[in-house]
Structures are given as structure tokens and as C-alpha cells.
Amino acid sequence: MVVEPLYPEFSTNYNLLLTAFMKRPVGIYPDDIGVVYRNPTSGRYFRLTWREWYRRTGRLSNALTGLLAIHPGKSHQPGDRVGTMALNHHRHLELYYAVTGCGAVLHPINIRLSLDHIVHTINHSQDKILFVDDVFWPLLESIYDRIKNTVEKFVYMSDQPGFPESRIEPVYEYESLLQGQSAEMDWPNLHEDTYATLCFTTGTTGLPKGVMFTHRQLYLQTLHIIVGDSFASDPSSLHLGEAEVPILITPMYHMHGWFFPFISVFSANKIVLPGAFTVEGFCELVETEKVTSAAVVPTILAMIIEYQNLHKYDLSSLKTLGVGGGALPLGLKMKAEKIIPGFNATSGYGSTESGRALRAFVKKTALNWPEKKLNEIQVKTGLPVPGVELRIVDEKGNPIPRDNETLGEILIRSPWVMGQYFNESEKTAEVWRDAWLHTGDVAKVDQEGYVTIADRKSDMIRSGAEMVPAILLENLTTTAEFILEAAYVGIPDEKWGQRPMAIVSLVPGAKENEKDILNYLKTEGVEKGKITNWMLPDYILISSQIPKTSVGKYDKVTIKKQLPELLSRAKKTN
Amino acid sequence: MVVEPLYPEFSTNYNLLLTAFMKRPVGIYPDDIGVVYRNPTSGRYFRLTWREWYRRTGRLSNALTGLLAIHPGKSHQPGDRVGTMALNHHRHLELYYAVTGCGAVLHPINIRLSLDHIVHTINHSQDKILFVDDVFWPLLESIYDRIKNTVEKFVYMSDQPGFPESRIEPVYEYESLLQGQSAEMDWPNLHEDTYATLCFTTGTTGLPKGVMFTHRQLYLQTLHIIVGDSFASDPSSLHLGEAEVPILITPMYHMHGWFFPFISVFSANKIVLPGAFTVEGFCELVETEKVTSAAVVPTILAMIIEYQNLHKYDLSSLKTLGVGGGALPLGLKMKAEKIIPGFNATSGYGSTESGRALRAFVKKTALNWPEKKLNEIQVKTGLPVPGVELRIVDEKGNPIPRDNETLGEILIRSPWVMGQYFNESEKTAEVWRDAWLHTGDVAKVDQEGYVTIADRKSDMIRSGAEMVPAILLENLTTTAEFILEAAYVGIPDEKWGQRPMAIVSLVPGAKENEKDILNYLKTEGVEKGKITNWMLPDYILISSQIPKTSVGKYDKVTIKKQLPELLSRAKKTN
């Protein structure tokens, strides 16, 4: 009775493609500055109008399909993989759209991984071409022999003209490549289920795993993030109206730079790219570009507020700072708000597999709550992003009660969680069970529905029959004025199985010792009922540095490896 | 090489379904008031928490699939059609989700159509069940014989208990129907290409045509509207943060009530439903519910600002008023802003087929423009909603220049434009040509990209070789302080083909005559270069009423039918 529509690909099944995002700013603001990049070494600025950036992206995509002979994918079949070893700059943003727009798969290589892991991700992905920053050329040289049978072509990217002397071949130079191409790209109407990106987990528990996303998934995640942020009515909302000026600090090789390369292009924001993060570069760019928004990991936030010359910059344009990639310690939040006026930070939660899943916005019914209570909400991990189905279940698979105490594993599904790991069907089957993605993260829920991530399942300290989330102790410890950071691990104990050890770094100039830390935990923790006596650490180590992963989280794997040495320097508390 | 993901229906092909919208408010705000309905006749209020409303919707959906034996559809195959003859109330909102959520197709019947057309839409849709308000029961009685072979069951909806005496059968009573059902509905995981709604055009040029939308299309339109409104950084943005309180004035049988039934549920707004629009009811609800936002047609706006008791109400909560369904005359906008403080109105454009396509937001580069220039932007029809592909082409199919003068037809495609008319393949082929939906609307574009709808192709006045958009004259005429509304039509002329006639209604108490109107058009129009001399109307009729369609637009078809009579009362101007 009902016939197929005449042009389903432009009506009922209109393909959701990333190219739509970049057509918007070039359509509305062709001659306004769209992309600003500051080279962190030379301090030199690059400013591109949307038209200029769009035309460069078109040239690049033509080069990929023509000269470099990239083969596009089809629905559910990945096209050729194109790897990038690159910082946050306009060229990387061009690659985001040029590679995916012609049907190939972008693999932003995490250059903070170990060399072994970098080699693994390139070979496992079978990257056909690598685009490499000048600063990463020595890194490339050092792994060349182990990837040269996989990678067919290399493209050198630099703000300076010319090539480096190198045995690597064949090498193309990015800017020359663009010059030979037409700026008009006939963007193909790909099927929306064509794979667009391949991102690797950081591999804290083994080899990094490749996570694939289709155009449709990335498009839908972008839309839902914007929608979720726009729903929130608290001033800390990261809602990016088009007049906002975000700085992209999260590396673009880490979880799609937390989606700013998609959100901000579609929003037609002026996008500020700092290359690599430095506190000086951040402060200068906020001042010169009137940056309004940023999203950082807690460690970066700690670096910013610790910076001695902070007061020399005009940071008054900065309105919102989102924090993710790790819990936001309440103490850190309060210190930051004291130091940067107008500053307002909130937390969130996501993973490579799940994308953004939670954000700690203030519910409309809580807008008038006292500040103390609001602070508590904002360091909770958050409420589900619109469109996310969330279940938190005990070991039998039953939903946990909303008592802010019982712990359970987070299960997720949504229009954008990954379908599978790249060429790892067994590992896919480990996380995709009973129609839910099992995150391996443990959390509790309060009566209002706010979720607090307790810890990774593997990061729980098991003392006797009890499980102590390391993060609970870490959050409490950093509320102390004199403490900058704190990591907890379990150390083997004959009687209890494990007992907690604290590794603590103090704020610059602080003179407190291990006993002061223990006293603080007793008066602020035990006496106020936040922890029980048996959760107090058996060992405390004051250290100027705490090992961290490539994305700034406490590196518990490395800490556990160094345990004997760390333990030897720590002080026993009883 | 790459295998299918394990649960594609929950990952790469996660179905975009309307049920997701209602799961959000019930998850976050279960015990807060979500839906408020005021009976416009009795003045009685109904207030439902989100949990109550959600459970009622579940009961209704169980009743539909069980007792009433509705058959769900599949991908691209429509399920049974369920018609509604209903005002804007909580029951209608329940039907929106209960019918679509179980896989059936909702047909909100436009009860303002002629009886012949109402009968046509019911029979053409093959509505299996009708849900009918008590106030529309006499209407149903009057068409019963012509639809009883199509419709199998009737459901009577009323705020009062009991049934009317009636020969119609079988009749169920809405509230009783719910009581017999479980509140737990096992919402099926439908394919997202399942049809959800069937809406009819108003049929100004023939029989109304049925326009079908899938879950996916409605879901994506909702997301893109929210995203578009959240991008805009001007204060007139209709951006609905969850703390906003919208009142749904646009009838829910007209273009999905301009998508508020979807947007506001997903946003978890407190939704205010006035039944039918009355100025008194509107003012009372704004005051009692602290309504912040509304969207109206220009005629309703004129009714509001004309209302004598307006000053007796506290309307200070009202921040934003969107205007659509017809161009917003600059004069009307300025009058409204003078009368309601804080009031800020903008225009938009869309049709049943295209959904929302344009909105007149202020670009970020124009935020500091002088007020006069901003006003001009805000009565232009607007810029494309994000995700909308727009082409405006001349008769040869070439894009028109951005000179704010040349006219062309608007072609559209987007993830939500209709795929086809229901069982009208020939009419579908008329509008879907060369992979674009041809809207039949004529527009011009300025240098900044702002589109201004000139008129329907069929509403142009053809004088000599020139085409005069009626709307140009209508907008100019209503800038006069003493004029409330103005409609222009072409009257047959031996020499010129057509010549313009104006039908004008004055503001209450105004004493101006036809000569004053002509003088105003000469001094404000011709002398200021807005129109040329030959565009001045040959005839002017001052009339207390101008015929309008069911959605409040000037009814040019009726006006043209009454032309001899109208012409006999009009005054010749030269």
C-alpha cells in the first residue's frame, strides 16, 4: 500500500554525516575568523576564516582521494585508516573532516602511550598513511622499522617550510600537498553507517583496544551533548552558544578531544587551538582571544591554579570550565573558584567506549539550594546525558537502590556507544553482554538520581570483606587546604588482604607532615562520618610527583609496579 | 574482516524513538509537576507529576494494544492509524506518546477544516479509532454517517464523568479505559523507520494531503530544533532550558503543535496546556504558572495586544514569544514590544512537509547592531535551522544572488523533511524532484544570508510583467500605527492582468479612512523607496474582519471567492 519515498537518502533515511557540521559555519560566517592556532614553541599565531579553513579541508580531502589513493568505506565496512600523530592545531582539525568526509577512517594516535603501544595501535589499525607533526618526527624515526611494512605513506606537518632529513619514505609535505589540489571537494553522500574514526583505549589493563565509531554515532553524540548542555539551567552549564570562544585543551587524539572538534565547528564558535597545553600558552590565549570556555582534566586544573604568574593575565572572559577524565576533588574545585573569579567547574563521566555519559548539572529543583549543597552535587559524577540509557546493577544484575551507598557496575546503551572493538571479537563479547555495554566502572546513586563513580572495578581496595573505593579517600584527602593531590592504592596485607596506602603531594610551600595528614583524615573524615576508622591509610607517602597516565589520571598500574620502592619511602601510621 | 556488532540495535543502529523523550523527565523529575491543563470553559485546573502522566500514558498504550486491538507498523510500513479530535490537554499529550510508542500512527485531525475536508482526512487515513473531545462530539455526530464505514471504535474524552447520549457506537470512555489497564507499559523497541504520525496540509489549494513522519524523523527534528535554538546567542532565542515554562498555544493538530509536545517533554519543562486559546485563559495561565515562553501566529499576537484587560494580569514572567505560521509584520512586532515589557518576538518558517526550516535569530556578528537594524533582521524569515540544506533557485534551477531582491523558489532537504504523501504518489512526485523537496514558497536572500519569504508562488500579484509579493504590501501597511491587519489580493484587470486590492482592519477606535491609508503607503512606502508607485493598491476596503484559515493565516482562497462582493464595498483609489 505504501510505496518507498522517491529520494529516501534525502528524506526518511537522510544520512547523518560529519560534513554537515562544517557546512554550517562556512554558510553563515564565511569571512569571520573560525580557527585560531598558536604554536606553543614559537608563539606564532595562525588565524583562518571559516571559508579559508573549509577550502583547505576540501584540498586535503581531494589530496587523500586522489594523490594518496585512500579508499572509502561502506556501510559497516571501514575504509582505509589514516593515522595522525599531531597536537591540537588547524591542520589536525582539517584532518578530522577531510579524512572522514571522503569515507576513510581517522585514527588519532595517542602519542603519550608507550612506544610498544603506539606501534601496536598503528599495526593493529593497519594505518595506510600517517600525518605527523614536526615535533613527533623523532618519535616516528624511533618506531619506523616496526611500522614500515604497514604504513605506505607519510605526511610531514610543520609551521616551517621544508622537510627534515630522514630515512623515512615516501614523505609528502602537508602545505605542498594542499597547493596542488582543488578547493572544491565534492563531498560524497556516504551511508551514515560508514565508519569515521578509530580511537584506542589507554590500555591500563593490557594492550590498547581500538574503538570504532560511525558517522551516525558521532553525529548523534554531538547533537545529544549540545542538547544536554542546553537543557541545564545552572550557570555552570557548558552550553556553547555560537558566541562562545572555547579553547581545545584535551588532546584531539583523546576521545575525539571530548567532542569539541565536532560541537564547536557545528556551533560556529571561534575555536582556539593551543598545540600542546602549557599554562603560559593557555593564559595568553584566554587573554588575547577572550576565551570563554574550556574543559580539562583535574591535573590540568591543578597546574593552572598553581601557576605563579596567573595574576598577570586578564582571564576575566573565562566563564566555564568543565572537568572530566577523573573525579573533580571538592578541594580542588573550591581552590580554583577562589583563585579565578567567575570560574565555575563541574564534573562529568565517559569513556572511549561510551562517549559522554554523565554530567553534573544542577537540577532545576536545586537551583536555590545553599552553595555548600550545590558544591556537593557538582563534584558528583552527574546525571545521564539525554538519550543515554543507564543501569547500575549489583553482582546479580539487579538495579541498586538510590541510597548513595550501595555500589554497582554501570551498564550503558545509547545511540552512540561503540558497537565493537576493531578486530577483537572476544574483547567485544566481554563488554557487550545481555544487550548492555558493561563499563567496568563502579558507582552509587543518591535519591535525586545523581551518580557518583566510586572507582574502576579493578581500583577498589579490598580490605577484609569490604571494598574501599580509592577515590573516596582521594576526594576527602584533597579537601585539605595544604594538599594538592592524593592517590590511594591497596597494599598486600596478610590479615586483611589489602590495606590502603596514600601517596600525597602538598601545595607549594606547605610544611605539613604525615601526621598532619592522618589527623586531618581523622577529624574531617572519621569524626564527621565520611569514612570509618578502618579506612584510614596504614601508610602515607609525601611525594612531589604522583605517576599519571597519558591523559592525566593517576596511573595505578605504574604505582602498583613501583609499590616496594614507594612503600620503602612511606611512613607507617600506626 | 569486520564482523557485525553483537547488539547493533543498541549500538551502531540504536533506534531513535519518541519514547526516549518521555523517559527523561520521569527519570529526573518523577514527583514534580510536569503537565498543567486548564479547562478553558470551566476554568478548572489539572496538574500531573511526570510519574502520574507517564503512568497514564502507559495505561493508555496498553489499552490501545490490548482492548482496542491496534496493530503496530514496521520499518516503512505504517501501523493502524488513530485519529484525535482534541484540544491541547494532558490527554492529547498522552495520545502523542501512547499511540506512537506502541507502533501505531497518530493522526491529529485538524478540526478547523471544512466538514468535507475533515471527512476526507479520516477516510483517506483509514483511521481505525477516533479519540474525541466532548466539545467536538456534535461535530462527530454531524459527520458520523460519512465515516462510520472507516472508523471501528470511538473514545470519548471529557473532564466530566459519563457518556453523552449518542447513536455513535461503539464508544469507550477515556478515563474508564485507563483504569482497567496496567501502568507498566513494555515499550517495544520499534525500528526507527516506523511511521509515527500522519498530518494533513491545510489544503488551501485542493484536498488536504497527508504527510507522514517516522520516529527517526520526528526525533531528529526535535534535536535539531533544540540545537538551533541553543546556538543562537541573542536574547530572543526560544532556547528551552529545563527551567522554562512553555505554554502550548499552537493546536496540537497543527504541525505537531510546532514540536513543543516533543521538545518540552524531552526538556522536562513544566508544560502548560490551555485547551483552546482564549486571551483570558492565556493571561491567567501566564500569571498563575509563571509561563516564560510561547509561540504564536501573528493573528494570536494581534489578539493578545489588543486585549482590553491585558494590564490587569502579571505577565512579567513571559520572556520569549516566537512567531511563525506567517510573516511577522514589523508594525505588529513593535506594537507588541511596547505593550508587553520584556517581550521579544522573532519569526520563523516551516511547513507541514518541511517541518521547521528557518528561524530569524541574530547572528553573533550582529549582536551589537542598532535596534532598528536588529528589528529588520528579526522580521526577516530567518537563517536555516542547523541540519537543513536550503537552495533558493530561479526558474532555470540556478541559485539566486544574495541581493535581497531577486526572487526564487525554496528547495529543502534535511533529516526530517517528509518522504512522501500518504497514498498520493503523483502528488509526491510533484514536490520531490531532482532530489530536492520543492516548497512552492518564493523568497529572496540578503548578503548576510537572511532569507525573506516573499509569498506562496500562488499568492503573487502579477501586474504586467512584474510580480508583487502580497506580503511586501501587507508588511508595509501594518507598520501604520492605526492599522491592525492588512491582506492584499490581485483583482483581474484588463490592461495589467492583475492589480492589487487591500483589505484592511483598523485598531479599535481608529478613525482613519481609505485616503489616509493611501497617503501612508505613499509617504512611508513610495517616497522611502520601499515600494514603487505602481504597487499602490487600486482598491482599498476597510473591514472589521479579514477571512482566515484554520491556522490563522489570511485565507486568500476564500477572499478570492468573495471578490465581487468585497470589491463592491471597496473604495477605488484613483
Image (tube, coloured by chain):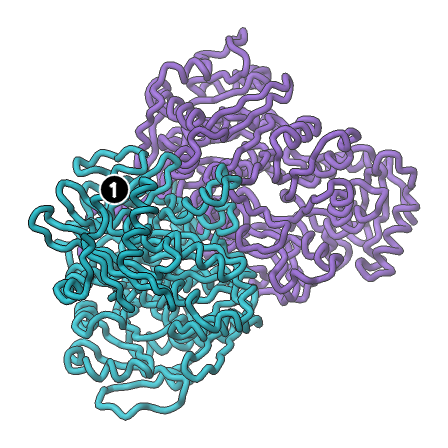
Chain colours: A purple, B cyan
Q: Is residue B64 visible?
A: yes
- Image coordinates of residue B366 in percent, x first then y, are 48, 39
- Image coordinates of residue A222 in percent, x first then y, are 47, 44
- The residue under the point 17% across, 59% down is B205
Give the amino acid type for the residue marked by disc 1 in the picture.
Thr
Q: Is residue A273 left or right of residue B324?
A: right
Q: How many marks?
A: 1
Q: Quadrant of residue B324?
A: bottom left
* Residue B257 vertical position relative to residue B115 in the rendered view, above or below: above
* Residue B326 vertical position relative to residue B35 in the rendered view, above or below: above
Residue where numbered disc 1 is placed? B532
Q: Nearer the viewer, residue B20 or B369?
A: B369
Mark 1 is surrounded, within 10 Å at the Cα level, by few (under 14), some (14 to 19) or many (20 or more) other residues, namely: few
Q: Nearer the viewer, residue B496 or A104?
A: B496
Q: Is residue B538 left or right of residue B545?
A: left
Q: Quadrant of residue B137?
A: bottom left
- Image coordinates of residue A71 in percent, x first then y, are 34, 27
Q: Is residue A488 visible?
A: no
Element on which disc 1 rests: loop
- The residue under the point 81% across, 36% down is A566
Instruction: Check the image and name the residue furthest to the left.
Output: B494
Q: Quadrant of residue B182?
A: bottom left
Q: Nearer the viewer, residue B272 or A433?
A: B272
